[in-house]
Image (tube, rainbow, N blue to C red):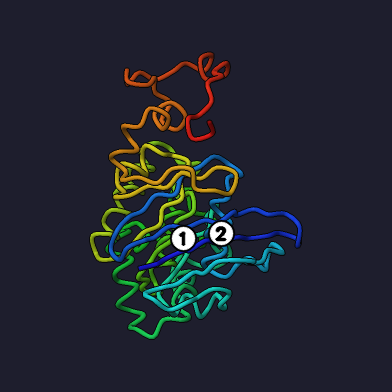
Amino acid sequence: MLEVANLEVVYHDVILVLRGISFQLPEGKIVALLGANGAGKTTVLRAITGLLDIQNGDITKGEISVDGKTITKARPSEIVSRGVTQVLEGRRVFGEFTVEENLRVGAHTSKGDTEAHAMRVYDLFPLLKERRKSLAGYLSGGEQQMLAIGRAMMSDPKYLLLDEPSLGLAPLLVQQIRDIIVEINEQGTGVLLVEQNANMALSISEHGYIMETGKIVMDKPSAELMRDEDVQEFYLGLHAGGGERKSFRDVKHYKRRKRWLS
């Protein structure tokens, strides 16, 4: 289990971004972490994978553990070797490298069979196998997202952290990414899915957490979140109880406070 307990993060020694975050990602499960821009979702992932230093961030309280062993403030390479890998928002592939070279970069900490890991990735993404000699910079947005996920899978992670994998993709590609996440999970990899596309995330996850202003404000099984009136209105764009989508005019002028803020 990947566990985050009472985590606080400060940027530049003064800006408190995470305020006592706690959640669990059980082995072999999909967990969704939802919230608007600025809620602190990406900061959670940076804290887990040891990337806070890049943004002048620091963990000031709490603990992060993997299968009972702490990884709080561990080096990123050590965290990957413990079985935790992140796919960054915005793909971040090496555009001047080929698809094959990008994948090999993802295997640099792996102690397993690199060729076997590559074949697994090509089975998940047949298109990448066809393009393996192509420069990553010439791939489409959807293909680059597949490559980013494939590169992360090269370390054979036990827990995969995905930061906005559907961002900027056409609906058909979002569906493809969704199906691939499910397939990866069915192969035994636990997935922490950070998404603004709440409908997609809740449709495939077992449990969901909703973040606002650096705090967890709701924590329920995903099926219950899908039925929650506030989640329907503020995250799924539906009228409470009616299941009808609201118009832009309705959303723009909507004033009711979320119940968890009362």
Residue nearer the viewer, 237 or 1: 1
Tell me if residue 235 comes above or below residue 122 in the rendering: above
At numbered mark 2, what does the secondary structure look like: helix, strand or loop?
loop
Residue assigned mark 2: 92
Q: Are marks 1 and 2 in contact (CB under 8 Å)?
A: yes
Q: Compute the Cα span from label 1 to label 2.
A: 7 Å
Residue nearer the viewer, 123 or 34: 34
- Callout 1 amino acid: Ala
Residue assigned mark 1: 148
Image side of residue 79 versus residue 192, left or right: right
Seen as rendered, the residue at the extreme left is 186
Q: Residue at x 44, y 60 (%)?
A: 161
Q: Quadrant of the N terminus?
A: bottom left
Q: Residues within 10 Å of mark 1 (few under 14, many from 20)?
A: many
Residue 218: x and y, percent?
43, 43
At numbered mark 1, what does the secondary structure look like: helix, strand or loop?
helix
Q: Residue at x 54, y 73 (%)?
A: 72
Q: Residue at x 41, y 52 (%)?
A: 193
Q: Which numbered disc flags the more N-terminal residue, 1 or 2?
A: 2
Residue 39: x and y, percent?
57, 45
Residue 197: x and y, percent?
43, 39
- Callout 2 amino acid: Arg
